Amino acid sequence: MNAPVAEWQPVKVAAPLAALRALAGLVLVAMVAVNVANAVARYSGAYVLVGADELLVFSMVWMVMVGAVVAVAERSHLNLDLLPLRLKGRARAALLVFQELVMAAACGYAAFQSLMFTLKIGRLGQTSMGLGVPMALPHAALLFGFAGMAIVALILAFRDAASLVAAPASAEARR
């Protein structure tokens, strides 16, 4: 059930994941450029990049959440695999479905809480101190990330459950 990405990803999923991966890479390159420009400006005394640190923090949060969605979709996220490595066949597949459902529930709950907070902070009209960015924007990164992870985990769970149901029971299970 822990198949390589190419084995389980339909074509419709591979392109958005590649786009998200590219987006995270571009954001990282932009962050490095802003950080270098900020360092040069700060230590030369020539000018000050107001809000550069703020921009870097907001960008990092977005990049982490985009990367988390990609990692879940590619099944390359950190996990505790002591038990799945010991199990074989249908038992292992069933455990993976259970883990994916737990992940979907936990991320769904976190997404809901993120939505409530993002809406609340948006209604308050709070903006960042340096750039004046509405604070709902950086907080929406958590909503995007948790909702994306929940959706991907649900897709994986349903896909794995369908293959578990469709797969014939092994000879060992029939004994």
Image (cartoon, helix red, strand yellow):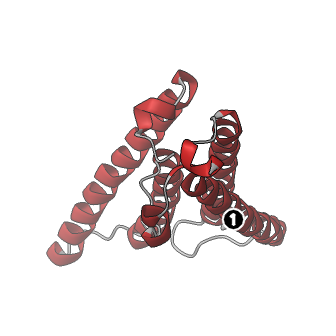
146 and 140: which is toward the camera: 146
Q: Residue furthest top?
A: 11
Measuring 38% from the left and 39% from the top, which residue is drawn there?
Answer: 22
Task: Please tell me whether mark 1 sits on a helix, a strand or a loop.
Answer: helix
Looking at the image, residue 14 sits to the left or right of residue 174; the answer is left
Above-or-below relation of 20 to 92? above
Q: Residue furthest front?
A: 175
Looking at the image, residue 149 sits to the left or right of residue 76; the answer is right
In which image quadrant can residue 47 be found?
bottom left
Residue 95 in the image, given as x and y percentages of width and height: 61, 60
Measuring 70% from the left and 68% from the top, which residue is drawn there?
Answer: 106
Residue 52 in the image, given as x and y percentages of width and height: 39, 67
Reading the image, the residue beneath label 1 is 102
Looking at the image, residue 97 sits to the left or right of residue 62; the answer is right
Can I make out residue 156 in this image? Answer: yes
Residue 91 in the image, given as x and y percentages of width and height: 59, 57
Residue 34 in the image, given as x and y percentages of width and height: 31, 59
135 and 168: which is toward the camera: 168
How many numbered circles does the render carry? 1
Above-or-below relation of 68 to 161? below
121 and 69: which is toward the camera: 69
Q: Residues within 10 Å of mark 1 (few under 14, many from 20)?
A: some
> Three-letter amino acid code at disc 1?
Val
Looking at the image, residue 22 sits to the left or right of residue 72; the answer is left
Above-or-below relation of 66 to 52? above
Can I make out residue 133 in this image? Answer: no
In which image quadrant can residue 103 be found?
bottom right
Measuring 74% from the left and 63% from the top, which residue is drawn there?
Answer: 105
